[in-house]
Image (spheres, helix red, strand yellow):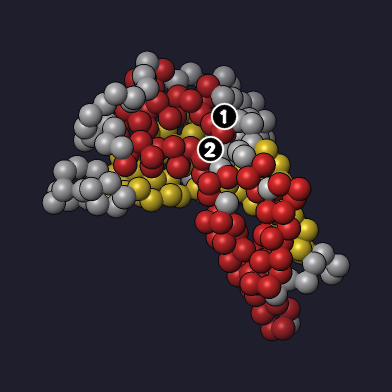
Amino acid sequence: MLGIERKFIEDSIGRFRIAKFLEVELDRAGFSKVEIQRTPMVTRIAVDVTKPGKVIGRKGKSIQDLTETIQKKFGIENPQISITEVTKTELEPRLMAKSVVRQIEMGKNIRRILHFSIKRIMESGALGAEIVASGKIAAKGARAKRMRVCAGYMPKAGEPKRLVSESHVTAYPKAGAIGVLVRIVQPGTIFPDKKDMKPVELPKVIAAAASPEGDEGKE
C-alpha cells in the first residue's frame, strides 16, 4: 500500500514540475494550461496556447526540441505533445491574470482593471468570475491591501469548488509585489446544488466599466 501511495505522490510531483516548466518555457507562446496523462506506454501532454506556431516551429523543429528536452529533463521515455490553439482568451484564467498583471505593471488604476476584466470574462459567457489582487496596491511604503471583484456564481467550498478553473500570477510594479488570482466558472458547467442557473445580471459598476487604457495612476 505504501508503495502505491509513494508512486501516486511521485507522479503528482512529476506532473507539477512538467507543468511549471512548460508555463515558463511557453510563456511567449501565450501558455494557458496543460493536461498530463500517463499510461504504461506513453505520457500524453496536451498544451493550450494562443500562438501554436511558436511552439511547433518551422517544420516542427521547436516541438521536437521541446519533446526531447522534457524526455531528458524529467526522465519520461515516450512523451507525446499535442498543441491546441486558445481562441477565447477571456475564459482562460492564466491569460486573464497575465493581462491584469501587465496592466498593473503599466501603472493603470487597479480597481478599473479588475472591473473591466470581470466584465470581459462575463460577457464571454462565464457563469461566474472572481479576481483578487493582494499586496502593495497602495503607494510604496503603505501596508498590504486586498481588493476583490466578482460577479455571477462562485462556489467557495466542497465538490462544486473543484469545477472552478483558476490561476495565480504575480505582478511586480515599483511599489512592490501584487498577487493576482483569477477564478472562472466556465460556460455550461453543471453544479449539483444549482440545477437551474439563472441568467447573470452584472452589478452596475461592472456593467459600466470602461477600459483602463489611458490611466496614469493606481490606487
Locate residue 67: give its quadrant. Answer: bottom right
Residue 28 shown left or right of residue 73 in the figure? left
The residues tagged by marks 2 and 1 sit, at their Cα atoms, a distance apart of 7 Å
- Mark 1, residue position: 126
Mark 2: which amino acid?
Answer: Ile
Mark 1: which amino acid?
Answer: Ala
Locate residue 185: give its quadrant. Answer: top right
Furthest residue in direction front, as rendered? 58
Residue 4 shown left or right of residue 156 in the figure? right
Number of numbered discs present? Answer: 2
Q: Residue at x 56, y 38 (%)?
A: 92
- Mark 2, residue position: 184
Q: Residue at x 68, y 48 (%)?
A: 57
Residue 96 shown left or right of residue 143 in the figure? right
Residue 180: percent from left, percent from top: 39, 45
Asked if labels 1 and 2 touch by Cβ distance under 8 angstroms, the answer is: yes
Q: Within 10 angstroms of label 1, few (less than 14), some, or many (20 or more) residues? A: many
Reply above or below: 153 against 62.
above
Q: Residue at x 66, y 66 (%)?
A: 69
Q: Nearer the viewer, residue 176 or 143?
A: 176
Q: Residue at x 24, y 43 (%)?
A: 137
Q: Nearer the viewer, residue 156 or 67?
A: 67
| Secondary structure type for disc 1 | loop
Reply above or below: 131 against 187.
below
Mark number displayed over residue 11: none
Residue 84: percent from left, percent from top: 71, 42
Q: Within 10 angstroms of label 2, few (less than 14), some, or many (20 or more) residues? A: many
